[in-house]
Amino acid sequence: MDPIRVLVVDDSVVVRKIVTDVLSEDPQIEVVGTAVNGRIAVGKLEQLKPDLVTMDIEMPEMNGIEAVRAIRSTRSRVPIIMFSTLTERGASATLDALSAGANDYVTKPANVGSVAASMESVRQQLIPKIKALTGRPVVTGAARAAAPAPVAVRPPAPRTGAVKSPAVLVVGSSTGGPEALARVLPSLPASLPVPVLLVQHMPPVFTRQFAQRLDRLCALRVVEAVDGTPLAPGTVHLAPGDHHLTIRKTNRGLFTALDQAPPENFCRPAVDPLFRSAVDTFDGAVLGVVLTGMGADGRIGAGRIREAGGEVLVQDQATSVVWGMPGAVATAGFADEVLALDRVAEAVLRRLTGPRLAPARTPVPATTGGRR
């Protein structure tokens, strides 16, 4: 198999060298070129024909967001991974880049201290995402992504009892999730009769801004989850970065609960703790949705949902940026339906409300996520 051809775009000579040196150590990756700004990168794209581009955000002449827009305007679907800073400004710029068509992001290596630490950060964060976005097996780090060739979907496992009417909607997503969520959630009405809890793999700062962006798009109310908030229909609670989101049941009702228990599936927040908690709290009366993402987070929790009498929907391979998480659920036989992204909201509404309640808004073009 030919190596993955990568174009590295950054105005810092130090960062370019760190990224190039680390990627060049991997026999499956070849750095075919570098660029000091977006304008030069766009010019090199046709010449070098990379399989993937790593892109800094703040650069002279043409910044990373402008470069992503320029690349997508040529109808190129080459995967683009942004280098981001863990600041309010960095989070906002990264979400803008995802909105413009970038596929994913990693922490900028210059932020992590020594050169050795920077190199290890690139090795751990960037290489698995490069391989996942180009359809290569990921054998280290944050788990295994599906190859782009069609994968056999196992029929849903037989049920031992009746399907329960959902009392809560729980959603999990990762790579490509911002765009997917920006397409699904605006198609759900404010009158949704159940609370919604959502895990999107994101660091702190990012989740707060992402919740605000989703809230502007949706008829539903979308908030970054805070510990001890009562669950109410029509409100979406997004797990904050670096905290697992679960549900606490008391004699006063049901409330959100946050904790910093160890990561699961290399993630915090993780989908599995939320799914398990929903099953325990609602006695299996749960509708789970797993959207695009690397790894297998949510697979075990989806199995628990179905075993307890709930239902699980997953995004299909054709419309996923990475068919890792939904693919893991589907191939395990835990998916009641495998759906194209634009059919997910309708399937959710069918189960939660029946055909009598239509979406409150016309689906809008994604404004917060990458594309494939």
Image (cartoon, grey):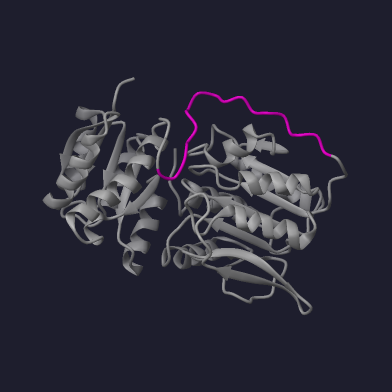
Residue 251 lies, with reference to residue 354, above or below; the image says: below
The quadrant of the picture occupied by the C terminus is top left
- Of residue 169 and residue 140, the one placed in the foreground of this image is 140
Q: As drawn, which residue projects farthest toward the right? A: 162
What residue lies at 68% left-to-right and 55% top-to-bottom?
276
10 relative position to 363: left or right = left
Residue 109 placed where, x, y %? 25, 54
Residue 267 lies, with reference to residue 372, above or below; the image says: below
Residue 259 in the magenta stretch? The answer is no
83 relative position to 149: left or right = left
Q: As drawn, which residue projects farthest toward the front? A: 262
Q: How many numbered dots are placed on residues in this image?
A: 0
The quadrant of the picture occupied by the N terminus is top left
What residue lies at 69% left-to-right and 39% top-to-bottom?
334
Range shown magenta:
141-159
Q: As drawn, which residue projects farthest toward the top? A: 1
Residue 188 seen in render? no
Residue 306 placed where, x, y %? 75, 45
Residue 284 placed where, x, y %? 78, 54
Residue 339 placed where, x, y %? 64, 37
Residue 148 in the magenta stretch? The answer is yes
228 relative position to 296: left or right = right
Residue 290 seen in render? yes
